[in-house]
Amino acid sequence: MAKAKGKKASALKSDKLRVSMKLVTSDVCERCKTPCTRGMEYAARMRTAGAVGKGVPCILTRHTTS
């Protein structure tokens, strides 16, 4: 009996590299040694009265996991 031809197995989701960044608040962005535009814009928005924020992803804390 011959084997059936099928699709090749693609890379599993667990085998792919995952990139993640930490969420930082405006006070961390303001005292950062290497400020980025995303962080500075977020910090400026948080200075206004009544602003509510949960943080912004920091590119400096980026790391990959496999």
Image: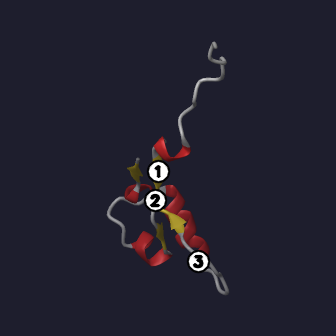
Give the number of the disc on residue 52. Answer: none
- CB contact under 8 Å: marks 1 and 2: yes
Q: Which residue sits furthest top?
A: 2
Residue drawn at x 54%, y 66% is 56
Badge 2 element: loop
Q: Quadrant of the N terminus?
A: top right
Instruction: From this view, report whether residue 49 is shown above or below residue 29.
Output: below
Horizontal placement of 5 versus 17: left or right? Answer: right
Q: CA distance from mark 3 to mark 1?
A: 26 Å
Residue linked to disc 3: 46
- Estimate how packed mark 3 is, as few (under 14), some (14 to 19) or many (20 or more) residues with alpha carbons within 10 Å: some
Residue drawn at x 59%, y 24% is 8
Instruction: From this view, report whether residue 22 is shown above or below residue 6.
Output: below
Badge 3 element: helix
Q: Give the x, y percent position of residue 11.
A: 53, 35
Task: Judge depth for marks 1 and 2 and give the one in front.
Answer: 1
Residue drawn at x 56%, y 68% is 42
Give the number of the disc on residue 21. Answer: 2
Q: Which residue sits furthest front?
A: 1
Q: Which is nearer the N-term, disc 3 or disc 1?
A: 1
Q: Of the residues shown, which amino acid type is indicated by label 3?
A: Met
Q: Of the residues shown, which amino acid type is indicated by label 2?
A: Met
Q: Of the residues shown, which amino acid type is indicated by label 1?
A: Val
- Estimate how packed mark 2 is, as few (under 14), some (14 to 19) or many (20 or more) residues with alpha carbons within 10 Å: some
- CB contact under 8 Å: marks 3 and 1: no
Q: Nearer the viewer, residue 28 or 54?
A: 54
Q: Nearer the viewer, residue 6 or 41?
A: 6
Horizontal placement of 13 versus 60: left or right? Answer: right
Q: CA distance from mark 3 to mark 2?
A: 20 Å
Give the number of the disc on residue 19. Answer: 1
